[in-house]
Amino acid sequence: MSESRKRILVVGGGAAGPKAASRARRLDPKADIKILEAGKSVSYAACGMPYYVSGAIRTSKQLVMRTADYFKQRLDIDVLLETAALSIDRSAGTVHCRDSEGREFPLPYDALVLATGARPFVPPLEGRDLNGVFKLKDIPDMLAIADYIKKEEPRRAAIIGAGLIGLEMAEAFKARGMSVTVVEMLDWPLPALLDEEMASMVTRALDGQGVRLLLSQRAQRFEGTQGGRVKRLITDSEAIDCDIALVSIGVRPETSLATEAGLQIGATRAIAVNEFLQTSDPAIYAGGDCVECKHLVTGKPVFVPLGSTANKQGRVIGTNVAGGRDTFPGIIGTAIAKVFDLAVARTGLTEREAAQAGFKVVSSIVSPTDVAEYYPGVSQVTLKLVADAENGRVLGAQCIGKAEVARRIDVVATAISCGMDVKALSSLDLAYAPPFSPSMDAVHDAANVVRNKMDGTAKTVSAQQLKKKMNGHPDLLMLDVRTNTEWRLSRIEHPNVQHTPMRDLALSGAEFCDGKEVVAFCDSSIRAYLAQKMLERKGCKDVKFLDGSLIVWPYKLYEPKE
Amino acid sequence: MSESRKRILVVGGGAAGPKAASRARRLDPKADIKILEAGKSVSYAACGMPYYVSGAIRTSKQLVMRTADYFKQRLDIDVLLETAALSIDRSAGTVHCRDSEGREFPLPYDALVLATGARPFVPPLEGRDLNGVFKLKDIPDMLAIADYIKKEEPRRAAIIGAGLIGLEMAEAFKARGMSVTVVEMLDWPLPALLDEEMASMVTRALDGQGVRLLLSQRAQRFEGTQGGRVKRLITDSEAIDCDIALVSIGVRPETSLATEAGLQIGATRAIAVNEFLQTSDPAIYAGGDCVECKHLVTGKPVFVPLGSTANKQGRVIGTNVAGGRDTFPGIIGTAIAKVFDLAVARTGLTEREAAQAGFKVVSSIVSPTDVAEYYPGVSQVTLKLVADAENGRVLGAQCIGKAEVARRIDVVATAISCGMDVKALSSLDLAYAPPFSPSMDAVHDAANVVRNKMDGTAKTVSAQQLKKKMNGHPDLLMLDVRTNTEWRLSRIEHPNVQHTPMRDLALSGAEFCDGKEVVAFCDSSIRAYLAQKMLERKGCKDVKFLDGSLIVWPYKLYEPKE
């Protein structure tokens, strides 16, 4: 054995497989390492595909990070393209393969790595085989879409699913000059990523970009032309004319090889692995989009396929198949997307997820400036922080803005990973200079608002709670403390709303509240909190402010036409 | 007592004082709160001053965050402008004051807050009182500089000190059309922030912007015209013609009030405070630029005046003077600066500081892309990570680039704050999508290189070590593995350097190394590490790569003129 070369066989040439192979090579100079890939390219950047369709990336070659030649020459790794893995014979320690010419043969392994990825889920909608109806899984899908756009010059696009891929592709189709309609079954966009009020910022942004977003609608079928081209998407309440359509309602792990080999499949229907990324057969490892991961906040298995996770897992597998002993602890559900000029990101649990997981939740929504408020080019960054009301432990965050959103999410992600509480988060010594951040960053602000809520200094209601109160509650005073200018541009139209700018509020007396329940709001809650404290000083007994104020108000605002 | 209003007196209207007063007001609606400020404005953004001088911020009013009227009307806080605190009578519980008209009077306190700030240290250089020689401490200084530039139209600026303020002002003077020379006593710019090889990126950037940087030179005196205007700065080796000069070699805490009152001054010569930010007199609190902080990595007191720390401390003090009990744990030395189009940041300890603090250090320098390598507008971000070689605990980081540098530093800052090691850092679930980051972020890369070094997979030498080896060491092969194009643009000119692109190296045989000690390098170490592993596979025994490669090579590169 000491003289023989270890045979490491990798199935799948996406992200995790090539990473595992490369890492194994660095640690074991002698091993026989092979990658099987059913497609024509290895090590391609699937996450970049929407940007090729949009035209931001000019050649598809840019998405192929490493060629088979590169693996051979630089790393002495054999890549077998257009070679499918048909089945695993675990007792023999072989994988049965078929190459592009139909030849079948077994390949032996000492360690096997399954990196078989995931595939888009396309429900059995009538008309889904029409020309112009696409999914986006791999380079051939991407090239087919680009080719169709070039040849058929579609002007109207319909997208089923307002998830990450759906919205990235909405932007891509827009960039190609099309009108775009997105149909989402659930009640807000990016439903797997965001809470409702945060998602309302995405809804407004899409509206501002001219994307038609149909929420709470279920796609029923496609209708085609006589020539077999898609011409209409029918939902449970509308008919949407379209020349091109994309189905992007999620992906399923590709587990057939693992299932047929009798390997354990997890509760999420992805391959179950231990912390060494071994399947139920210790000689077989699995990583990337085909496995489930442990969520480090809930401790439960989740299926969250992402290129970043795939790469980290690839490295761990590479170490372990080369005889080392590394672990992959799990994930916390961090994700980010560019939605036109907004960055939209989340980490940990949303408020809804945290409540579902059994936590008693306290949250805050702040919208401070991204850089010093006097620095040129300043914009706002909206951050929602979710914490455990019992002990202040940080559970999650969502962040939306035009500036450095990833920064705020990554700080919270790091804090969650080490079990930090809001007090520690508010004390973090983060990078500050006027071109980069206000002296108290959004992360500090959000943590301090949670602390204020936990100790009773700040009292808030959520948009959903306020919406419920608004109906038939004569003793509710909804107090808009913004300036006259802001009030003129947009406002909540409701009999209970009263507009009293901060300046006037400061001059008012104790009679102002008149025994009413007051909910103050402004654009971002900064003045609303000040108003709460000011009214309390004047003797008002029941004053709260609206969590996050109007920036994240998920209901209609009245915008007078000038 | 229960009926009486608590008297909270704050000395200093910069950042910490107003923050403490505002916070106290939120918690104690009845307290009598006063802020004494010797100058004419309260709550101004001192960190923004260089951007006013540069013209990026158009009116000085933008830097005044809150007026005295605002404090009165919104917060019921009295601001006494142009009122100096002359002395503290601790037994009487009063501060003796003098107002703008010379009237002296005592003000009583139940809780006193010292937020007296810091002042620039101006050494007793001959000629420092000449017209046109400035420091930059406060709004009057800033206005004086701007006024001088407007009236005198200086064309040549000399700056003593290549620290944060020095370099920010170099950019400001450049933006005003001046030629700029910066004189630094130590051997590299931003010496308090960066290690030498990282600072070399700043040196090159300043050179690229036409700023003349004179290192290892000591300013001796200024010479003036007959009219009393500065015309020359004399150092120990040069005479620099100038029409305006700035002395920015650091600040000293303003402690005279505290010292005279017999309060304890710390080892750093700033006011010593406990975690509640109480001075040695528990009725007297202190925060902001006049106090020292505990460094959370070394446990030692440090004096690092920053607006971000001042704001956090202000909040803690506000809570405590209002009867609460909050703590300020300390800092880790995070800092960031904009140096022309570069962001330059650090957190924790530099390698030098870590070694001085007694740590056995392992470090890495990586320069991956800031976003996916195929995404439009991609640039490089250079990150140095410093860890404890005994256990992998993260001790510090430095980061330089044109893109989201603060993000990477803030992640490491958060990791340091919870004692994370490089393994945990490399496993973090950070925000990934092509427009925001590569699938493995710079933080992951840097952590993995440290792990590779700790387990012996990667072997490196630092630039300083290699520089020493280069003299009279015939068996040293310095292997440049970059492409021909890169080689033609710039390179290390030295007899031991050999250029063999990766492509050719892959084809070479075992005889390549010929028993020599090989140090491979490229632009950023990615290929150099690959070369190390490739040569080891070919049987070479002694192969290392240059930490960080040429991006951070702190010595001269030969750049052939085309």
Image: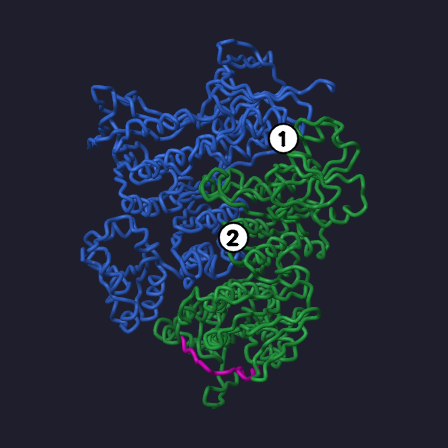
Chain colours: A blue, B green
How far across and how far down the image is residue B129, in percent? 59, 81
Q: Earlier in the sequence, mark 2 or mark 1?
A: 2
How far across and how far down the image is residue B389, in percent? 70, 46
Q: Amino acid at mark 1?
A: Arg
Q: Is residue B218 visible?
A: yes
Letter of the chain that mark 1 sits on in the rendering: B
Label 1 residue SS:
helix
Task: Name the residue: 66% across, 55% down.
Answer: B196
Q: Amino acid at mark 2?
A: Ala
* Quadrant in which residue B131 is drawn: bottom right
Left or right: B276 as drawn, with respect to A464 = right
Q: Which residue is mark 1?
A: B503
Give the vertical position of B98 relative to A30 (above or below): below
Task: Name the residue: 54% across, 39% down.
Answer: B440
- Number of numbered discs: 2
Question: Quick check: do tags 2 and 1 share a chain?
Answer: yes
Asked whether A179 falls inside the magenta stretch, the response is no
Q: Is residue B282 visible?
A: no
Crowd around label 2: few <14 · some 14–19 · many ≥20 (10 Å):
many
How far across and how far down the image is residue A538, in percent? 31, 71
The numbered disc on residue B406 is 2
Q: Which residues are magenta?
A: B77-93
Q: Quadrant of the N terminus of chain B?
A: bottom left
Q: Nearer the viewer, mark 2 or mark 1?
A: 1
Q: CA distance from mark 2 to mark 1?
A: 36 Å
The numbered disc on residue B211 is none
Give the vertical position of B74 relative to A554 (above or below): below
How far across and how far down the image is residue A87, in percent? 51, 14
Label 2 residue SS:
helix
* Quadrant in which residue B539 is drawn: top right
Crowd around label 1: few <14 · some 14–19 · many ≥20 (10 Å):
some
| B128, A209: nearer the viewer | B128
